[in-house]
Amino acid sequence: MVRVLELSDVSVVRDGNVILDHIDWTVESEDRWVVLGPNGAGKTTLLNIVSASMHPSSGVARVLGEQLGRVDVFELRPRIGFASTATSRRIPPDETVFDAVLTAAYAVTGRWNEEYEEVDTRRAERVMREWRLEGLRDRRYGTLSDGEQKRVQIGRSVMTDPELLLLDEPAASLDLGAREELVQLLGAYASSGEAPGMVMVTHHVEEIPAGFTHALLLAGGRVHAAGPISEIITGERLSEAFGLSLVVSTSEDGRFAARAQS
Ligand SMILES: Nc1ncnc2c1ncn2[C@@H]1O[C@H](COP(=O)(O)OP(=O)(O)OP(=O)(O)O)[C@@H](O)[C@H]1O
Protein backbone atom coordinates (compact mmCIF):
# COMPACT_ATOMS: atom_id res chain seq x y z
CA MET A 1 0.00 0.00 0.00
CA VAL A 2 1.31 3.45 -0.95
CA ARG A 3 0.29 6.74 0.60
CA VAL A 4 -0.93 8.82 -2.36
CA LEU A 5 -2.14 11.85 -0.41
CA GLU A 6 -1.12 13.25 2.93
CA LEU A 7 -2.48 16.59 4.08
CA SER A 8 -1.29 17.90 7.42
CA ASP A 9 -2.92 20.98 8.90
CA VAL A 10 -3.69 22.35 5.42
CA SER A 11 -5.49 25.68 5.21
CA VAL A 12 -6.40 27.84 2.22
CA VAL A 13 -7.19 31.50 2.73
CA ARG A 14 -8.33 33.74 -0.15
CA ASP A 15 -9.19 37.43 0.18
CA GLY A 16 -9.27 37.00 3.93
CA ASN A 17 -11.76 34.09 3.72
CA VAL A 18 -10.78 30.74 5.21
CA ILE A 19 -11.80 28.25 2.52
CA LEU A 20 -10.07 25.17 3.93
CA ASP A 21 -9.49 25.14 7.65
CA HIS A 22 -6.73 22.92 9.14
CA ILE A 23 -7.38 19.80 7.06
CA ASP A 24 -5.70 16.51 8.00
CA TRP A 25 -6.33 13.71 5.53
CA THR A 26 -4.51 10.68 4.18
CA VAL A 27 -5.38 8.54 1.16
CA GLU A 28 -3.73 5.20 0.45
CA SER A 29 -3.47 3.61 -2.98
CA GLU A 30 -6.08 0.98 -2.05
CA ASP A 31 -8.61 3.61 -0.95
CA ARG A 32 -11.55 4.91 -2.95
CA TRP A 33 -12.75 8.10 -1.26
CA VAL A 34 -15.89 10.09 -1.83
CA VAL A 35 -15.91 13.75 -0.74
CA LEU A 36 -19.31 15.18 0.13
CA GLY A 37 -20.48 18.45 1.61
CA PRO A 38 -22.86 21.36 1.15
CA ASN A 39 -22.32 24.03 -1.54
CA GLY A 40 -19.33 26.17 -0.63
CA ALA A 41 -17.91 23.56 1.77
CA GLY A 42 -14.51 23.65 0.01
CA LYS A 43 -14.67 20.46 -2.08
CA THR A 44 -13.41 22.04 -5.31
CA THR A 45 -10.65 23.84 -3.42
CA LEU A 46 -9.59 20.54 -1.86
CA LEU A 47 -9.46 18.95 -5.33
CA ASN A 48 -7.39 21.90 -6.56
CA ILE A 49 -4.85 21.19 -3.82
CA VAL A 50 -4.65 17.43 -4.39
CA SER A 51 -4.44 17.86 -8.18
CA ALA A 52 -1.40 20.12 -7.62
CA SER A 53 -3.26 23.06 -9.16
CA MET A 54 -3.10 25.17 -6.00
CA HIS A 55 -0.76 25.42 -3.02
CA PRO A 56 -2.04 25.56 0.55
CA SER A 57 -1.73 28.89 2.36
CA SER A 58 -0.34 26.94 5.32
CA GLY A 59 0.27 23.33 6.28
CA VAL A 60 1.89 20.56 4.29
CA ALA A 61 0.32 18.75 1.33
CA ARG A 62 2.08 15.69 -0.06
CA VAL A 63 0.80 14.32 -3.35
CA LEU A 64 2.26 11.01 -4.55
CA GLY A 65 5.01 11.46 -1.98
CA GLU A 66 5.98 14.94 -3.21
CA GLN A 67 5.50 18.03 -1.10
CA LEU A 68 3.67 20.85 -2.88
CA GLY A 69 5.92 23.89 -3.03
CA ARG A 70 9.02 21.70 -3.26
CA VAL A 71 8.24 19.82 -6.44
CA ASP A 72 7.94 20.77 -10.09
CA VAL A 73 4.15 20.50 -10.54
CA PHE A 74 4.65 19.98 -14.28
CA GLU A 75 6.35 16.68 -13.45
CA LEU A 76 3.80 15.76 -10.82
CA ARG A 77 0.56 16.52 -12.72
CA PRO A 78 1.02 13.88 -15.47
CA ARG A 79 0.99 11.23 -12.70
CA ILE A 80 -2.53 12.33 -11.67
CA GLY A 81 -5.70 11.55 -13.63
CA PHE A 82 -8.29 14.32 -13.30
CA ALA A 83 -11.76 14.41 -14.85
CA SER A 84 -13.82 17.53 -14.30
CA THR A 85 -15.92 20.00 -16.22
CA ALA A 86 -12.83 22.21 -16.51
CA THR A 87 -10.71 19.42 -18.06
CA SER A 88 -13.57 18.57 -20.44
CA ARG A 89 -13.62 22.12 -21.82
CA ARG A 90 -10.11 21.53 -23.13
CA ILE A 91 -11.27 18.79 -25.51
CA PRO A 92 -11.95 20.34 -28.93
CA PRO A 93 -15.57 19.71 -29.99
CA ASP A 94 -14.44 18.43 -33.41
CA GLU A 95 -11.97 15.88 -31.95
CA THR A 96 -13.03 12.27 -32.57
CA VAL A 97 -13.68 10.15 -29.49
CA PHE A 98 -10.73 7.88 -30.27
CA ASP A 99 -8.33 10.82 -30.63
CA ALA A 100 -9.70 12.47 -27.49
CA VAL A 101 -8.74 9.32 -25.55
CA LEU A 102 -5.46 8.67 -27.37
CA THR A 103 -4.07 12.20 -27.07
CA ALA A 104 -4.17 11.88 -23.27
CA ALA A 105 -1.07 9.69 -23.67
CA TYR A 106 0.83 12.88 -24.41
CA ALA A 107 -1.25 15.10 -22.13
CA VAL A 108 -2.49 17.12 -25.07
CA THR A 109 -5.86 17.81 -26.59
CA GLY A 110 -6.31 18.28 -30.31
CA ARG A 111 -4.42 15.82 -32.49
CA TRP A 112 -1.79 17.41 -34.67
CA ASN A 113 0.84 15.14 -36.14
CA GLU A 114 1.88 13.54 -32.84
CA GLU A 115 3.50 10.17 -33.37
CA TYR A 116 1.79 7.61 -31.17
CA GLU A 117 3.39 4.36 -30.21
CA GLU A 118 1.63 1.08 -30.89
CA VAL A 119 1.42 0.59 -27.12
CA ASP A 120 -0.58 3.85 -26.73
CA THR A 121 -2.97 2.85 -29.49
CA ARG A 122 -3.52 -0.55 -27.88
CA ARG A 123 -4.13 1.04 -24.51
CA ALA A 124 -6.58 3.53 -26.03
CA GLU A 125 -8.46 0.60 -27.61
CA ARG A 126 -8.69 -1.05 -24.18
CA VAL A 127 -9.85 2.14 -22.48
CA MET A 128 -12.49 2.53 -25.22
CA ARG A 129 -13.79 -0.97 -24.43
CA GLU A 130 -13.71 -0.47 -20.64
CA TRP A 131 -15.68 2.79 -20.77
CA ARG A 132 -18.13 1.59 -23.46
CA LEU A 133 -16.87 3.99 -26.10
CA GLU A 134 -16.23 1.54 -28.94
CA GLY A 135 -19.44 2.39 -30.79
CA LEU A 136 -18.55 6.09 -30.63
CA ARG A 137 -15.01 5.81 -31.96
CA ASP A 138 -15.36 8.22 -34.92
CA ARG A 139 -17.97 10.53 -33.44
CA ARG A 140 -16.98 14.17 -32.78
CA TYR A 141 -16.70 14.93 -29.06
CA GLY A 142 -19.00 17.96 -29.35
CA THR A 143 -21.84 15.81 -30.73
CA LEU A 144 -21.93 13.41 -27.74
CA SER A 145 -24.54 13.36 -25.00
CA ASP A 146 -23.49 14.46 -21.50
CA GLY A 147 -23.22 10.84 -20.39
CA GLU A 148 -21.04 9.91 -23.36
CA GLN A 149 -18.82 12.95 -22.80
CA LYS A 150 -18.32 11.97 -19.15
CA ARG A 151 -17.16 8.51 -20.21
CA VAL A 152 -14.70 10.09 -22.66
CA GLN A 153 -13.39 12.42 -19.92
CA ILE A 154 -12.84 9.53 -17.55
CA GLY A 155 -11.33 7.42 -20.34
CA ARG A 156 -8.85 10.23 -20.97
CA SER A 157 -8.02 10.49 -17.28
CA VAL A 158 -7.21 6.76 -16.94
CA MET A 159 -5.37 6.56 -20.28
CA THR A 160 -2.05 7.58 -18.72
CA ASP A 161 -2.29 4.86 -16.05
CA PRO A 162 -2.33 7.49 -13.26
CA GLU A 163 -1.15 6.84 -9.71
CA LEU A 164 -4.07 8.90 -8.37
CA LEU A 165 -7.46 9.45 -10.01
CA LEU A 166 -9.57 12.50 -9.17
CA LEU A 167 -13.18 12.81 -10.32
CA ASP A 168 -15.11 16.03 -9.84
CA GLU A 169 -18.85 15.31 -9.90
CA PRO A 170 -18.66 12.75 -12.71
CA ALA A 171 -22.42 12.06 -12.61
CA ALA A 172 -23.59 15.70 -12.46
CA SER A 173 -26.21 16.59 -15.09
CA LEU A 174 -26.72 12.98 -16.21
CA ASP A 175 -30.18 11.47 -16.64
CA LEU A 176 -31.04 8.41 -14.55
CA GLY A 177 -29.98 5.87 -17.19
CA ALA A 178 -26.68 7.60 -17.96
CA ARG A 179 -25.98 8.06 -14.25
CA GLU A 180 -26.56 4.41 -13.46
CA GLU A 181 -24.40 3.31 -16.39
CA LEU A 182 -21.56 5.56 -15.24
CA VAL A 183 -21.88 4.61 -11.57
CA GLN A 184 -21.72 0.92 -12.54
CA LEU A 185 -18.65 1.45 -14.70
CA LEU A 186 -16.97 3.45 -11.93
CA GLY A 187 -17.84 0.74 -9.41
CA ALA A 188 -16.35 -1.97 -11.61
CA TYR A 189 -13.22 0.11 -12.16
CA ALA A 190 -12.89 0.98 -8.45
CA SER A 191 -13.10 -2.72 -7.57
CA SER A 192 -10.61 -3.81 -10.22
CA GLY A 193 -7.05 -4.55 -9.22
CA GLU A 194 -5.63 -2.00 -11.63
CA ALA A 195 -7.34 1.13 -10.25
CA PRO A 196 -5.14 3.64 -8.42
CA GLY A 197 -6.13 5.56 -5.28
CA MET A 198 -9.34 7.40 -6.13
CA VAL A 199 -11.06 10.55 -4.85
CA MET A 200 -14.50 11.47 -6.17
CA VAL A 201 -16.38 14.65 -5.29
CA THR A 202 -20.14 14.39 -5.50
CA HIS A 203 -23.26 16.15 -4.26
CA HIS A 204 -25.42 13.05 -4.03
CA VAL A 205 -24.96 9.82 -2.08
CA GLU A 206 -26.89 8.02 -4.86
CA GLU A 207 -23.88 8.68 -7.10
CA ILE A 208 -21.40 6.81 -4.89
CA PRO A 209 -20.37 3.66 -6.75
CA ALA A 210 -20.25 0.30 -4.99
CA GLY A 211 -16.65 -0.47 -4.05
CA PHE A 212 -15.91 2.98 -2.61
CA THR A 213 -14.28 2.47 0.74
CA HIS A 214 -14.04 5.83 2.54
CA ALA A 215 -15.88 9.14 2.85
CA LEU A 216 -14.85 12.65 3.82
CA LEU A 217 -17.60 15.04 4.87
CA LEU A 218 -16.61 18.67 4.48
CA ALA A 219 -18.60 21.53 5.96
CA GLY A 220 -17.51 25.14 6.21
CA GLY A 221 -13.99 24.29 5.06
CA ARG A 222 -13.49 21.77 7.86
CA VAL A 223 -13.45 18.00 8.00
CA HIS A 224 -16.76 17.21 9.64
CA ALA A 225 -16.12 13.46 9.56
CA ALA A 226 -13.81 11.12 7.69
CA GLY A 227 -13.31 7.36 7.69
CA PRO A 228 -14.71 4.06 6.43
CA ILE A 229 -17.72 4.78 4.24
CA SER A 230 -20.27 2.83 6.30
CA GLU A 231 -19.41 4.89 9.39
CA ILE A 232 -19.60 8.24 7.59
CA ILE A 233 -22.52 7.98 5.14
CA THR A 234 -25.14 7.77 7.88
CA GLY A 235 -28.26 9.81 8.57
CA GLU A 236 -26.73 11.26 11.72
CA ARG A 237 -23.47 12.42 10.10
CA LEU A 238 -25.11 13.80 6.96
CA SER A 239 -27.78 15.59 9.00
CA GLU A 240 -25.07 17.36 11.00
CA ALA A 241 -23.04 18.29 7.91
CA PHE A 242 -25.99 19.48 5.80
CA GLY A 243 -27.94 21.06 8.65
CA LEU A 244 -31.22 19.23 8.12
CA SER A 245 -32.66 15.95 9.26
CA LEU A 246 -31.76 13.24 6.73
CA VAL A 247 -32.44 9.53 6.53
CA VAL A 248 -29.92 7.33 4.73
CA SER A 249 -30.57 3.86 3.41
CA THR A 250 -27.91 1.42 2.26
CA SER A 251 -28.55 -1.37 -0.20
CA GLU A 252 -26.94 -4.79 -0.08
CA ASP A 253 -24.74 -4.00 -3.06
CA GLY A 254 -23.18 -1.03 -1.26
CA ARG A 255 -25.18 1.84 -2.79
CA PHE A 256 -26.72 4.67 -0.73
CA ALA A 257 -29.86 6.80 -0.88
CA ALA A 258 -30.74 9.87 1.22
CA ARG A 259 -33.91 11.88 1.79
CA ALA A 260 -35.13 14.46 4.26
CA GLN A 261 -36.94 13.03 7.28
CA SER A 262 -40.65 13.71 7.00
N1 LIG B 1 -10.44 32.62 -5.05
C1 LIG B 1 -11.38 32.75 -4.12
N2 LIG B 1 -11.51 33.90 -3.41
C2 LIG B 1 -12.46 34.02 -2.46
N3 LIG B 1 -13.33 33.05 -2.13
C3 LIG B 1 -13.25 31.88 -2.79
C4 LIG B 1 -12.27 31.66 -3.82
N4 LIG B 1 -12.45 30.40 -4.30
C5 LIG B 1 -13.47 29.87 -3.61
N5 LIG B 1 -13.95 30.74 -2.72
C6 LIG B 1 -15.05 30.51 -1.76
O1 LIG B 1 -14.67 29.40 -0.97
C7 LIG B 1 -15.82 28.62 -0.65
C8 LIG B 1 -15.56 27.18 -1.05
O2 LIG B 1 -15.56 27.08 -2.46
P1 LIG B 1 -15.47 25.68 -3.23
O3 LIG B 1 -15.74 25.97 -4.67
O4 LIG B 1 -14.20 25.00 -2.89
O5 LIG B 1 -16.69 24.90 -2.57
P2 LIG B 1 -17.47 23.60 -3.06
O6 LIG B 1 -17.66 22.74 -1.86
O7 LIG B 1 -16.76 22.99 -4.21
O8 LIG B 1 -18.85 24.22 -3.52
P3 LIG B 1 -19.93 23.68 -4.59
O9 LIG B 1 -20.52 22.45 -3.98
O10 LIG B 1 -20.93 24.79 -4.64
O11 LIG B 1 -19.24 23.44 -5.88
C9 LIG B 1 -16.99 29.27 -1.35
O12 LIG B 1 -17.67 30.07 -0.41
C10 LIG B 1 -16.35 30.11 -2.43
O13 LIG B 1 -17.13 31.25 -2.73
Image (cartoon, rainbow, N blue to C red):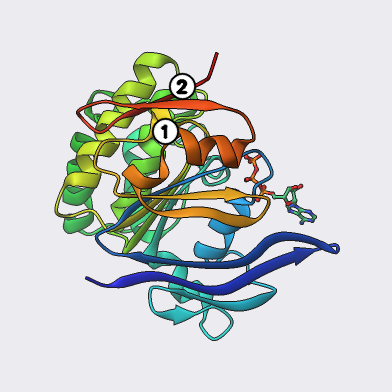
Q: Outermost residue toward the right?
A: 16
Q: In this view, does 206 lie to the left or right of 130?
A: right
Describe the element under mark 1 as helix, strand or loop: helix
- Which of the pair 1/77 is nearer the observer? 1
Asked which quadrant contains residue 256, the reply is: top left
Q: Dot 2: what SS?
A: loop
Q: Earlier in the sequence, mark 2 or mark 1?
A: 1
Three-letter residue code for mark 2 = Leu
In the displayed orientation, state which residue is furthest to the bottom. 70
Amino acid type at circle 1 is Lys
Task: Specify whether residue 96 is in view.
Answer: no
Query: Which residue is identified by label 1?
Result: 150
Q: Is residue 80 above or below residue 220?
A: below
Instruction: Name the mark on residue 174.
Output: 2
From the viewer's perspective, is 106 left or right of 13? left
Q: Please report the residue visible at 59 percent of the width from the left and 82 percent of the height from the top.
A: 69
Residue 242: image x %, image y %? 61, 36
